[in-house]
């Protein structure tokens, strides 16, 4: 099947940076949109941003100007560069991919990676 494997989370101080990666593997024809979501303790999962296979991006207002999503289609990998991190960015970050298998598309999730920003 399809697997999304994330890496790059960790502990960082306020104002620091982290880069998350998410690589897709398995049997599929193509990947359409990819994106990042996050879930803080006691809160619902929320969108961080998305990127189409053509490179068009969309971001939540809370991360605009600080976070950048990019992707390498040849490697089926999406990245999240996070700069100027704040304590409120602390959450488990999940990647999501819309994967085309046959004539249908399916959404897959990564296992999540913890990002903790200390004040």
Image (cartoon, rainbow, N blue to C red):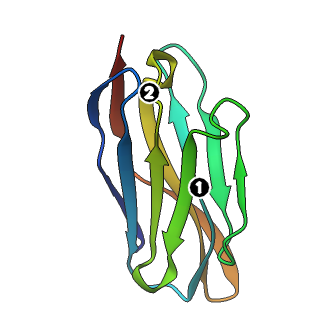
Residue 100 horizontal side relative to residue 114, left or right: right
Callout 1: 10 Å neighbours few (<14), some, many (20+)? many
Residue 48 horizontal side relative to residue 13, left or right: right
In the rendered image of this protein, does residue 64 appear above or below residue 96? above
Q: What residue sits right under mark 1 in the picture?
A: 35
> Residue 71 got which mark?
none
Along the line of sight, the residue nearer the viewer: 60 or 16: 16
Image quarter hosting the C terminus: top left
Residue occupying image coordinates x 49% and y 52%: 95
Residue 86 horizontal side relative to residue 64, left or right: left
Along the line of sight, the residue nearer the viewer: 29 or 58: 58
Q: What residue sits right under mark 2 in the picture?
A: 91
First in sequence: mark 1 vs mark 2 = 1
Residue 3 horizontal side relative to residue 86, left or right: left
Q: SS class of the residue under badge 2?
A: strand
Which percent across, then down, holds residue 110? Answer: 42, 53
User: Mark 1 to mark 2: distance in Å?
Assistant: 15 Å
Image quarter hosting the N terminus: bottom left
Q: Residue furthest left?
A: 11
The answer to which quarter of the image holds residue 9 is top left
Which percent across, then down, holds residue 41? Answer: 46, 16
Q: SS class of the residue under badge 1?
A: strand
Q: Is residue 61 visible?
A: yes
Residue occupying image coordinates x 55% and y 44%: 67
Tag count: 2
Residue occupying image coordinates x 38% and y 79%: 26
Residue occupying image coordinates x 33% and y 33%: 114
């Amino acid at each position: 099947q399809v697997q999304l494997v994330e890496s790059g989370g960790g502990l960082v101080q306020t104002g620091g940076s982290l880069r998350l990666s998410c690589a897709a593997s398995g049997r599929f024809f193509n990947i359409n949109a990819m994106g990042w979501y996050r879930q803080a303790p006691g809160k619902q999962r929320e969108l961080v941003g998305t990127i189409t296979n053509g490179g068009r991006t969309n971001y939540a207002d809370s991360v605009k100007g600080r976070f950048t999503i990019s992707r390498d289609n040849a490697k089926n990998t999406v990245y999240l560069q996070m700069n100027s991190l704040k304590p409120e960015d602390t959450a488990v970050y999940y990647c999501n991919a819309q994967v085309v298998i046959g004539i249908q598309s399916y959404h897959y999730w990564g296992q999540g990676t913890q990002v903790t920003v200390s004040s």
